[in-house]
Image (cartoon, grey):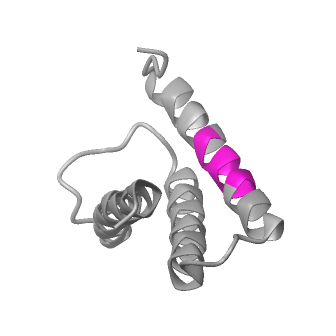
Amino acid sequence: MEDWKQRVVDEYKQLHGRYERLSAMIAKYESGTLTFTPNCPLCLLKMQADIMRKYLGILEIRGKIKKTNLPMCFLRMQADTMRKYLDILEIRGKIEKINLAD
C-alpha cells in the first residue's frame, strides 16, 4: 500500500477509536452514569463528536475513490471539517485550561 493510503487508513482507525470513546462518554454523561464531571458543556462535546463523524465520512469517501485523483471539493471539505474540529478543540482547551501548544 502506498504511504499516503496507509496514513489515511491509520488516521481513520485512530479517529474512529476516539469518536467511539467520545460517543460512549456522551451517552454516559446524558444518562447520569459518567464517573466524573467534564469541565466543558455537553453541547460542545456533541459538536466535537459531530465534526469527528463528518470527518470520518470524508475519509471513507477518500478510501472509496482509491486510485483516482481526488476532486478538489473533497479536499476542501476535508480541510474545512478539520479546521472546525481544531476550533472546537481550541475552545475545549480554553474551557478546561489545557495548553494545546505543548
Residue 31's x, y, as percent? 31, 73
Main SS, magenta residues: helix
Q: Position of residue 94 (x, y in %)?
A: 55, 25
| Between 74 and 55, the one nearer to me in the picture | 74
In the displayed structure, would residue 63 be above or below residue 102? Answer: below
- Quarter of the picture containing the N terminus is bottom left
- Residue farthest left in this picture: 35
Which residue ends up furthest to the right in the rendered image?
73
Q: What count of labels does the image hold?
A: 0
In the foreground, 22 or 61: 61
**What residue is rendered at 67% in x and 60% in y?**
78
Residue visible at 65% across and 78% down? 68
Quadrant housing the C terminus: top left
Question: Which of 7 and 26 lies nearest the eye of the viewer?
Answer: 7
Q: Residue furthest bottom?
A: 64
Q: Residue at 46% across / 56% down in the picture?
A: 4
Question: How far from the left and from the top, in percent, is residue 73?
Answer: 82, 68
* Left or right: 37, with 33 as reference point: right
Residue 35 shown left or right of residue 32 in the figure: left
* Numbered range of the magenta stretch: 79-86
- Which residue sits at x=60%, y=82%? 65
Location of residue 75 in the rendering, given as x and y in whole percent from the top left corner: 72, 61
Q: Is residue 17 left or right of residue 78?
A: left
Is residue 80 toward the left or the right of residue 2 in the image? right
Q: Is residue 71 magenta?
A: no
